Image (tube, helix red, strand yellow):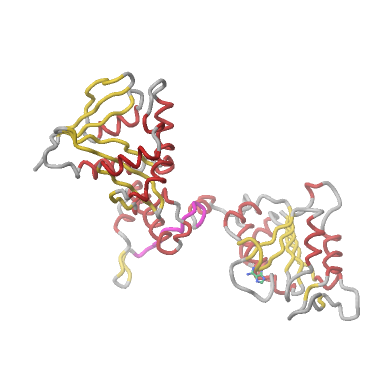
Amino acid sequence: MRIDVVTIFPDYLAPLELSLAGKAREKGLIDIRVHDLRQWAHDKHRTVDDTPYGGGAGMVMKPEPWGEAFDALISTGANDERPTVVFTTPSGQPFSQAVARELATRERIVFACGRYEGIDQRVLDEVATRCEVREISLGDYVLNGGEVAALAITEAVVRLVPGFMGNAESLVEESHEDGLLEYPVYTKPASWRGHEVPPVLLSGDHGAIAGWRRDQAVRRTAERRPDLVHPSVLIDDVDIRPVQAGDAGELFVLQRACWVQEEHDNPGVRIPALHETLDELRAWIARDTVLVARSAGRLVGAVRASLDGESWEVGRLMVAPDVAGRGLGRTLLERIEALAPAEAATYALFTGAGSARNQKMYKKAGYRLRGEIAPGVVRMTKAIRRP
Ligand code: ADE
């Protein structure tokens, strides 16, 4: 990978000689060249800025030196030899690990470090006719110029270039790579100034260690960066409550999403959940005992039950497809069972004869198959044991 940096303060980029990026240069993995913009300014004072059209405070970087810089640095050859030009600016797209991964795939990057109030817009517009242009911000604060941003972006990108990191695993495990912050880390000694290393890390149980690390990463992320947490990893923090009339719309949509697979697994069976109207749904949520599960505000599951003689009839157990397989269905089932009135002697439910996954989950929860009660529909029951 070749990286060119254009700046009026080339010395600012000296740290690229050190650190990891310096090593990559030594290994020949990257070729970094820093250019002084003023070499393309030709007046006596090598002027690179001027007052803004339309008035206002500060100075704007003139187009001519930038135009010449890009003429010198952008190859006139085939498209695939042209660089991606990154303008570092507080009004750019926020920099992230995802952007770093994308930039790490480029053969050539040219950083244009703006100063003052920014660069004449026509420079960006003109370069965009010749190659890919990205405007990238390091964060929601204003620096004196784009050099620190170019340094930070270079460091994040270069360490992703294949062959750069000795241990590729450490790339996969670190913060942001899986959308989570990294779990806390410890080294010897096991006890230090009265602070102990968490015992699970000394247990040698790799499954338990992986589970603990994942849990810590999720907790940290939820506490420090709730904006990063996807509801599917927050399944421990699901809030299960009785349904409210206002849940009807979301429940209607979730229900439709959840029973499509059932229809697929049970060809020819008419699935009521896919055909009822919103008003019909409103009627049963007003009539039955219904629980809904929310994660980070989003409706991700529900279940209903009603008493029929001595039978607590459980139904419409649904979990959003993207959070399935994490135990929420089982939890909802346990919670609705716990609400069975004293008169109930059995839990009962129906499911598709072809819904192998559902049947497996119900069997694990203690339900037994009682036979096909309609074509393609099986009944399962479990005796209620009270202490
Ligand atoms: N130049 C000035 N502030 C900046 C920021 N936050 N990100 C990128 N470049 C900048």
Q: Residue at x 81, y 54 (%)?
A: 129
Q: Residue 111's quadrant in the figure? A: bottom right
Residue at x-position 40% and y-position 40%: 278
Q: Is residue 179 rendered magenta in the image?
A: yes
Position in image of residue 74 (x %, y %): 82, 56
Q: Nearer the viewer, residue 300 or 73?
A: 300
Instruction: Out of 72 and 160, give the one closest to the viewer.
Output: 72
When the figure is inspected, residue 37 is found, relative to residue 272, above or below; the finding is below
Q: Which residues are magenta?
A: 176-189
Ligand 1 visible in quadrant? bottom right
Picture coordinates of residue 125, whole percent (x, y): 79, 60
Left or right: residue 142 compared with residue 208: right
Q: Is residue 354 left or right of residue 61?
A: left
Say left or right for 293 vs 260: left
Tell me which residue sits at (15%, 42%) in the image: 341
**Left or right: 2, with 163 as reference point:** right
- Residue farthest to the left, as pictured: 387
Does the rendering let one see residue 24? yes
